[in-house]
Each structure stands twice: as C-alpha cells, then as structure tokens.
Amino acid sequence: GNSVTQMEGPVTLSEEAFLTINCTYTATGYPSLFWYVQYPGEGLQLLLKATKADDKGSNKGFEATYRKETTSFHLEKGSVQVSDSAVYFCALSGAGGTSYGKLTFGQGTILTVHP
Amino acid sequence: DTAVSQTPKYLVTQMGNDKSIKCEQNLGHDTMYWYKQDSKKFLKIMFSYNNKELIINETVPNRFSPKSPDKAHLNLHINSLELGDSAVYFCASSPLRGGGELFFGEGSRLTVL
C-alpha cells in the first residue's frame, strides 16, 4: 500500500536559517504529493502540492520538487521566520479516480523557530 | 464564515459513554472525511463519504458510526468510549476528484478518562 516517511523531528532553527524537511514515499502509479501545515491549535491547511514528476510546488517561500527517480518530495525554505513554527505533514493522494482524495500522511515534523 | 466547522472543539468524558462530534462544510464539496490524530500527531483516515454515500471505511471499530444526513454534514458517533479513543478528530472536505486538496476543520479534542 501507499506510505509516506518524513524525517524525524522536532526541528529547531534560528530565524533566517535554511530549512529542509525530508519526505520519501512509496506508491503505485503516479500519486499527487502535498505538504500540509498545522499551526498551533488549528486544523491542517494545504501549503503546496505537485501532481506530476518534476513539478515544483511553491508557496510562502516554501518549495518542494516531485522527484520520481528518488521517490522524494523534500520541503525547503531559504530563510525561516518565527511564524513558520508549526507541524509540517507530507502526504500523497493515490493515483486514479477511485481514491476520492484520500490522503496518506507522513508522521509530521514539528518545527520550532527561535528569534 | 468558517468553511469547515466542527463541534464541540473540546470533549471530556468517562469511559463507556457515548458521544457525537458534528461537522458542517459550506464549500459545496461532494466529499467529506474523518481523520484521527493521535498524541504523536500521526494522522489516519477513518471514513470518507461522497454525496452521503460511504466510500472509505478504514478498519475502524464498529463503535464508530459516521452519519451523513446531506452532503454538507458528516457527523461521528462513538459508542462505549475507551481510553484509546482519546485523540483529536478532524473533519475535512474536498470537491469530487479535487486532486487531493482537503479543507480541514479545526479539530475536536476528545479526552476519555
């Protein structure tokens, strides 16, 4: 079945540091890939997505590239801010129409950014 | 206006009780979900409904019974609550064949004592 593996957290950085959160996946076919973010006390919200190999998703300074050859979708940001402190989830949606948008999530990575 | 709203936000109850969590979405989406987030933040799908019809049931104990009176509502009823049911339950919705973008509610934190 489908699975997503994220780097272990928590991750603690100083403001303006470079961020990488690794994500690799196992899936049949051609899944869509997502990063969701959960701010404290809130629900998850979509941060970025990529639907096919070599696509790059980007939003709010975050980027991730869909790498089929390495089955990876690593999240990066060049300069983090305190307001980026949150839990980040990598996820995939099964290929084809029968998945009805069901997402398989990674275990989440807690990011804390200090001033 | 909140797109996906859940009530209650917090629920504390005793083992053996029965409780319900309600969810409503005003986005006009066809598909709704319940996800469970455990204490380690791990998220797992429980159920999915498309236009009031159950389409995903992920090996959830039958003490959990979802009900969708219309496509804008998906409620979760839990019988005979157990300690292990303590978690945050998230409702979500998406358009049919929306490519996987889900819109989540703020979550309902259930604590079973």
Image (tube, coloured by chain):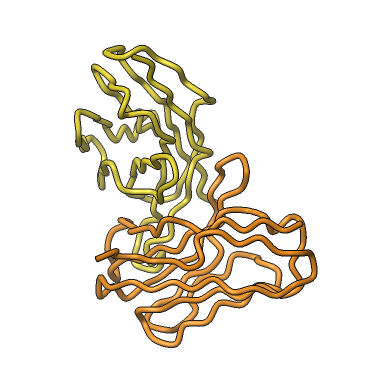
Q: Residue furthest bottom?
A: B69
Q: Which chain is orange?
A: B
Chain A drawing hue:
yellow
Closer to the camera, A48 or A72? A48
Q: Residue at x 39, y 40 (%)?
A: A39
Residue A63 drawn at (x, y percent):
24, 30
User: As displayed, is residue A100 above or below residue B66?
Assistant: above
* Location of residue A99 with respect to A68 vertically, above or below: below
Task: Pick the residue in front: A106 or A108.
Answer: A108
Task: Residue at 25% x, 70% y: name it.
Answer: B27
Query: How far from the left and from the top, in percent, is residue B89?
Result: 54, 59
x, y percent for residue A7: 49, 26
For the point 40% across and 68% down, the residue is A98
Q: Nearer the viewer, residue A37 or B45?
A: A37
Above-or-below relation of B53 to A34: below
Q: Residue furthest right?
A: B16
